[in-house]
Amino acid sequence: MGDLLKIKGGKPLQGQIKAGGAKNAMTKLLVASLLSDKKCTFYNVPNIGDVEITVNLCREIGSEINWDKKNHTLDIVTHELKTSYVPQRYSGSNRIPILMIGALMGRTDEDIIVPTLGGDMLGSRPVDLHIHALQKLGAKIEYRDMKKEGAYLAHAHHGLKGAVLSLNYPSVGATENTILAAVRAKGTTLIKNAAIEPEIIDLILFLQKLGANIMVDVDRTICIQHADQFHEVEHTIMTDRNEVASYAMCALSTKGRVFIEGAEHLQMIAFLNKIREIGGGFKIKQNGIEFFYDGKLKGGVHIETDVHPGFMTDWQQPFAVLLTQANGTSVIHETVYENRFGYASTLKEMGADIELFTQCLGGKSCRFASGDHHHSLVVKGPSTLHGKEITIPDLRAGFAYVMAALLAPEISTISNVEYLDRGYEDLVGKLIALGADITRVSQPKKHIDKTKNAIQNLLTIDKTLASV
Ligand code: UD1
């Protein structure tokens, strides 16, 4: 059993915090650094579990890494690959191991072995778009049962060759994997219908410094030219837009006022539009954004999650909590993941008025229209939320629960805190700085010895949304 959070809510959050570097950028840039043998220095590196996991994985592959956690800097250099085998224990850890195929294929003739649990390429945790795109570049990829577990074996013995390909859906991971492979593929690669999330742009900025030539067109086409001359890189990680949105919503729902240093306006446009629509206050300042309660929050909004530049799917869980405090009935239509409302039942038990629907509600019909997935949510507010014992199922739902607990006047006890550690640096410290009544209760030493390292344990958990 891991640590617990105890939260007594009901206080407005007030003050200032600094947002850290983006989890979804830093983890990918570590993998991208494996493309060359040059030293890469990163600034604004978040001290979070997912970076820890990726650092361990890169060390396993042969990287030398010097991570100064106090100063949030990290150097990585991979003179040569020690192995191209990603051990089984990383299989359920996050979406990073699959990116090793794209990053390593141009660097080694050996088979790249990336494990996966479940073993179905097209199953509930699909990587079909990754595989098809890499195959277009000439990769040979097959699925094998290895040591009773599934693994992908990939190689490009005859080298990778640039190609024109189109993704059926602008998947973030598949776009990243294809870009990584394309950098060392001969010729030019065009990825049509590519994802253009800000974290992908950060990856492209990094790769350009490393020596790649990459263009992003306005029609979701990314053009990558072959590169073989690489350089040392210094790169500052973009701010985590999920962390910014998370604390912003805490400020508004608790009727408080929080300045988030480092918040970048450009990454938050879709989010800020919705905050304005519900009557939330914000002010863009020179080095961050201030969020403040500006009178009663208005419900009656329709939110549709989408790929960038749309409203991000990772924002919808805490936004549902925010809407429990707004006057009126609102709809959230999740179009990116078919099953991302698992947290709704716990919020209902806390007093939220929420119903789930399988239909596409409120807007366009999405690719989940004909399935029986509960992918639309109707929330009526305002509601009074009550404290509860809660177990966190995944990172983003976890933050939604913390936010709900911050609204409930009773004490809530939250377990599986390690999920939050994977994406939020110093969550408790930051919330205390904002005046929250929150404590982290460490479990007795013998439990810690037994579990050794909670993050290592999580490496074996295979849940579709555990890490996204
Ligand atoms: C990344 C982010 C996650 C974010 C998501 C969408 C990281 C570590 N995680 O996840 O926080 O919510 O982008 O912005 O960066 N799909 C397929 N086949 C594939 C790949 C994906 O069908 O081969 C589907 C997925 O099941 C999902 C959708 O495409 O329904 C989006 O997935 P994708 O964009 O790939 O998300 P991730 O890269 O996993």
Image (cartoon, rainbow, N blue to C red):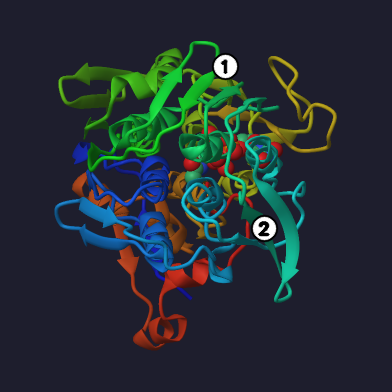
Camera-near label (2 vs 1) is 2
Which tag, 2 or 1, sits closer to the chain's start?
A: 2
Mark 2 is on which residue type? Tyr
Which residue is pictured at 55% across the width and 56% down the height? Answer: 109
Badge 1 local density, few (<14 within 10 Å), some, or many (20+)? some
Q: Is residue 135 above or below residue 149?
A: above
Badge 2 local density, few (<14 within 10 Å), some, or many (20+)? many
Answer yes or no: is residue 404 visible: yes
Q: For this view, does 315 lie left or right of residue 11?
A: right
Give percent across and percent down for residue 313: 55, 33
Q: Is residue 282 above or below residue 59?
A: above
Which quarter is ligand 1 in? top right
Residue position for label 2? 152
Give percent across and percent down for residue 266: 33, 19
Residue position for label 1? 300
Mark 1 is on which residue type? Gly
Which residue is pictured at 64% across the width and 45% down the height? Answer: 139
Give percent across and percent down for residue 247: 33, 38
Residue ranking furthest to the top:
218
Give percent across and percent down for residue 330: 59, 22
Q: Quadrant of residue 163?
A: top right
Q: Secondary structure at mark 1?
A: loop
Instruction: Using the numbered discs, state the Cα–Cα distance from disc 2 to disc 1 in whole angstroms.
Output: 46 Å
Q: Is residue 218 above or below residue 211?
A: above
Residue ranking furthest to the bottom:
446
Which is nearer the eye, 7 or 49?
49
Q: Number of callouts in the render? A: 2
Q: Is residue 270 above or below residue 422?
A: above
